[in-house]
Amino acid sequence: MKRALLTMALALGLASGASAHIGDKIYLIFEIPDGDRADLDLKDASVADWEDVVGDPSLVATDFFADPTVGEGAQYDPADMDYRIWLGWNASANIVYLAMERVDNVYINTYPGGNLGDLWSYDSIEFMLDGDHTGGDYTGSADSLWTADEQKLNNNRTAQQFVAIADAPDNRKVGYLGAGADWVNALPYADGGGGSSGVSPTTSVMEFYVTPFDDLIWNSPGDSKASDLFSGKIIGFQISAPDFDTAPQEYRAFHTLTGQAATWRYAERFADGRLVGAGGTAVESESWGRVKASFDK
């Protein structure tokens, strides 16, 4: 209960502390400290450990918008697809966590493995990050005069898009959609797992972490700069939940957190997330000081 009240107070008291990418709402993302990371089993296909470590879901399906221009444009219907999402971050590793529990009346996943860039074609989750809150066209199409090499260099350079899936025959379940995937998808930058159970409906779980980069040089990990994550920082993020009911790539619904089109291209269409330190003790603002003092009494 104390955490729920703290969440409400932070959302109300700090919303004016940063300019949002889209809208005036700032979502709170709580720290998963080093001592708790081992308690999250990314391969157990269960959200019970997320409920223990993180608490209540960070987001639920009613927080999302159905895109009317994609597929059938189906609106939220819990009998069709329902889901809960947990978010977290860790300062030592500069990583962001996400777990999703999804219940789907028709589960479309015939992914054959071998190409993580194809994960978006199936029932999955898309996760985009803008670690330094700079926005902009991040897919390399910002300048029509760029050469093919320049386009490749700038694709996903200042913000990144990831997709995760619950089941994969090669057991590789989280993929970055850009050049340099061989190392961006590997430890220590990313890891994940998941699984599914049941038929009509199918419950699937995706749980993973990824690294946001301020400057991702696809062919030079040593020159790439991971985002520095710290309490109080505002990052940009976007989550999309596709739903396929008949075949891969045949959308029934496409839910997004911001309700904006082409977030695969424009990072300024992401939402804002405020990183909150473990225990909610390190946000540097006068408003937070008043909130903290009220809870310390």
Image: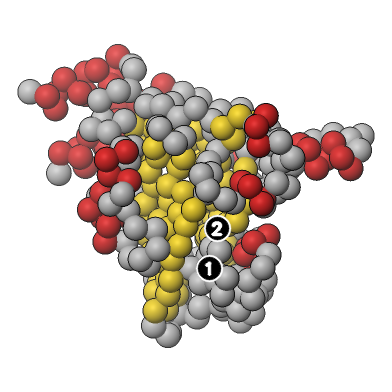
Circle 2 sits in a helix, a strand or a loop, which is it? strand
Which disc number belongs to residue 230? Answer: none
Q: Residue 171 bears which disc, if any? A: 1
The kind of residue on which mark 2 rests is: Val
Query: Where is residue 240 shown, x and y percent of the image?
Result: 54, 55
Residue 262, given in percent of the width and then of the height, sits at 68, 48
Tell which tag, 2 or 1, sits nearer the viewer. 1
Any part of residue 80 in sight = yes
Foreground of the two, 142 or 186: 186
Residue 61 figure quarter: bottom left
Give the CA separation, mark 2 to mark 1. 9 Å
Q: Viewer-proximal residue, 268 or 141?
A: 141
Question: Percent position (x, y) of residue 83?
Answer: 40, 63
Q: Residue furthest bottom?
A: 199
Query: Residue at left 32%, top 38%?
Result: 34
Specify the quadrant of the image occupied by residue 27: top left
- Coloring basis for residues: secondary structure
Q: Quadrant location of the N terminus?
A: top left
Would you identify the image quadrant in which residue 77 lies?
bottom left
Residue 251, placed above or below residue 155: below
Along the horizontal axis of the image, is 102 left or right of 138? left
Element at label 1:
loop
- Which residue has dot 2 on it? 174
Quadrant of image for the C terminus: top left
Image side of residue 11 versus residue 118, left or right: left
C-beta proximity under 8 Å, tags 2 and 1: no
Identified by mark 1, the residue type is: Asn
